[in-house]
């Protein structure tokens, strides 16, 4: 069976495939066609997951389908974009109807949750990897970029951190935990919830945003660097789930929250006066620090002492007087 | 060196990276932002090239850079879209500054020729493969889709066919040929010219179009099927280059032209009255057959006899009376 037919059978007919509205043309021609509404810009992001690098080689294809799309969709959330569609470039070592069906089912489940439609792609033979490119719509000049944070603002996150990193030893079979503790962590790893609604709600409020994929400290560093500011985070405010604490203990849980990626929770800067109205509207926003003049990222304890650990990928803190 | 820095160093600084105009935001944030002009739709296509499957494992990275983008850009040509930008998802087994520099140089060369800017992507560790997603702009309802061919029209191509297929044994070192014959074939393989200008010129004239990637007969079959028509091709009109004929002989050259992909020449249907004005304007259009009522694809000789070979992927010809 040729590659062309492969795509045709499993993906053009998948529940997540489709067109209509802003997807003017879907799978089956040389290109898909997107028709953004007047005044809207198109947000675009590409993510690759490689077998044995980004997920275990024998990963369940349904879970992989969910996770591969969630990881990509999270970048739309980070821009405040409304989801439109995605393309899937799937490289498979061999044709497997079972694998494809289960992968497509997981993908479709996440696509439905994210309101994303599969609009095109490519299927090739080779070592297993997945490249998803997602598309969203955002009003011109309202996208949440990384470079807008200003000294005096709050630094916030959209939920508890570290669960996905804490799940990794469970995923790899290196650690056992009671089901009631393991389940919530594994769910965050295999089925992260891209914070798409939160991202859109933050438009016009947050001055800078991203989704945490490299870890809190490293990603706070990305906002600090892009915005030309410093960010100070208070250890006691870093949100950690009960399950993570129970499985790994307090210290390792905090380490996972600070340095673990893969949670795909939003981190953003917010003028102080915007916090209470957003929280009152029900958004799960936690202020965990401040934006300051200077550069780099600092972690402080309750006494205000600098306890910043060495973490790959973030710039050392330096506050300007 | 982390993946993040990898991208940063070699691609954000590459000549093909950039923003401005319809690329509102380029590399460096969670998403790129495209701002199509009012009334324009966005054409999107994704192509993956896998080492050892789509190109030799030790392929020259400069040539691969050129080819990987040309293959993807050709889908924009096939839709009549004006090129805007592309994302690159690059999976590499190991960090190699030399490989990256040369790949980026080839990519940039082709990006300049195609007026495409690198707007984002992902770099990951794993078996060598490349997924490029290209973006173009096309006025609403003017894209060249596959489904518009009508009985009574001409079936046309944009240039000689089979050169890239004829180059493959040279690429693989299975065949030697004098440089003056080998060069033009190798150029068509490693540096195909996406017919972007021709595609845009065909808007408002061609009723259906695609770029030939599976071979003339198979791709004619795709138009026939999508449009619900039959296509009859005259063998004597199928254009074959002198170099291809000289290297492979008449019969093998024709076979390469009929069944070989990888030329990325446009094939399209055209009302008869549109042909002469387009040719007079200098477009390299060759009418090689007719669109008929019915289904499937037929190849005929000078006497009108059916000489259709068995080719994977095309539907058998059946003309309706």
Image (cartoon, coloured by chain):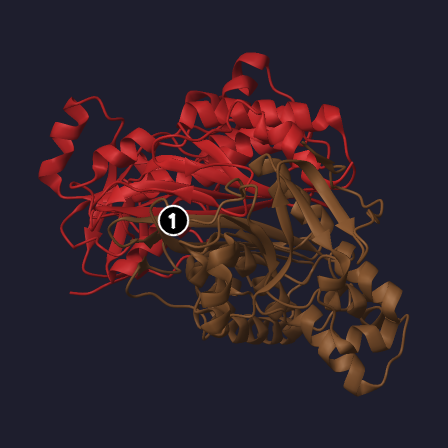
Chain colours: A brown, B red
Question: Pointer 1: residues within 10 angstroms few (<14), some, or many (20+)?
Answer: some
- The chain carrying label 1 is A
Q: Measured from the top left, where is residue A39 in percent x and y?
A: 27, 48
Residue A156 left/right relative to A15: right
Task: Give the mark count.
Answer: 1
Task: Tell which of B63 and B301 is nearer to you.
Answer: B63
Q: Which residue is drawn at 82% across and 55% down?
A: A303
* Rendered view: A123 above or below A218: below
Task: Read off the residue under disc 1.
Answer: A142
Q: Which secondary structure lies at badge 1?
A: loop
Q: Which of B43 and B292 is in front in this view?
A: B43
Instruction: Report which quarter residue A2 is drawn in.
Output: bottom right
In percent of width and height, residue A44 lies at 46, 48
**In this view of the protein, which residue sits in the foreground, A84 or B259?**
A84
Q: Which one is in front, B184 or B258?
A: B184
Based on the displayed image, in which of its 4 quarters is residue A235 positioned? bottom right
Residue sitting at x 17%, y 29%: B278
In the shown orientation, is residue B97 left or right of residue A175? left
Vertical comparison of B172 with B131: above or below: above
Work out which residue is located at the far left of the displayed protein and give it: B273
Left or right: residue A45 versus residue B101 is left
């Amino acid at each position: 069976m040729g590659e062309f037919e492969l795509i045709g059978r499993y993906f053009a007919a998948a529940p997540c495939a489709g067109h209509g509205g802003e997807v003017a043309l879907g799978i089956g021609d040389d290109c898909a066609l997107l028709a953004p509404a007047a005044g809207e810009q198109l947000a675009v992001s590409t993510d690759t997951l490689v077998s044995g690098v980004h997920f275990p080689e024998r990963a369940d294809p349904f879970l992989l389908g969910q996770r591969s799309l969630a990881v990509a969709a999270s970048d739309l959330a980070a821009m405040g974009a409304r989801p439109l569609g995605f393309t899937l470039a799937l490289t498979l070592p061999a044709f497997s109807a079972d694998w494809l069906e289960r992968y497509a089912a997981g993908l479709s489940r996440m696509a439905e949750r994210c309101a994303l439609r599969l609009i095109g792609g490519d299927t090739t033979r080779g070592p297993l990897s997945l490249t998803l490119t997602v598309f969203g719509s955002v009003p011109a000049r309202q996208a949440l970029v990384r470079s807008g944070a200003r000294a005096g603002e709050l630094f916030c996150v959209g939920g508890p951190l570290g669960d996905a990193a804490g799940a990794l030893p469970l995923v790899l079979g290196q650690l056992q935990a009671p089901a009631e503790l393991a389940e919530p962590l594994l769910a965050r790893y295999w089925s992260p919830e891209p914070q798409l609604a939160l991202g859109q709600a933050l438009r016009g409020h947050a001055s800078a945003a991203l989704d945490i994929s490299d870890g809190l400290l490293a990603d706070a560093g990305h906002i600090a660097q892009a915005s030309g500011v410093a960010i100070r985070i208070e250890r006691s405010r870093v949100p950690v789930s009960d399950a993570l604490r129970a499985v790994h203990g307090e210290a390792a849980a905090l380490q996972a929250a600070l340095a673990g990626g893969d949670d795909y929770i939003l981190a953003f800067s917010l003028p102080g006066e915007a916090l209470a109205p957003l929280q009152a509207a029900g958004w799960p926003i936690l202020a965990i620090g401040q934006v300051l003049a200077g550069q780099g990222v600092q972690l402080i304890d309750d006494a205000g002492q600098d306890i910043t650990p060495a973490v790959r990928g973030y710039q050392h803190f330096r506050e300007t007087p």
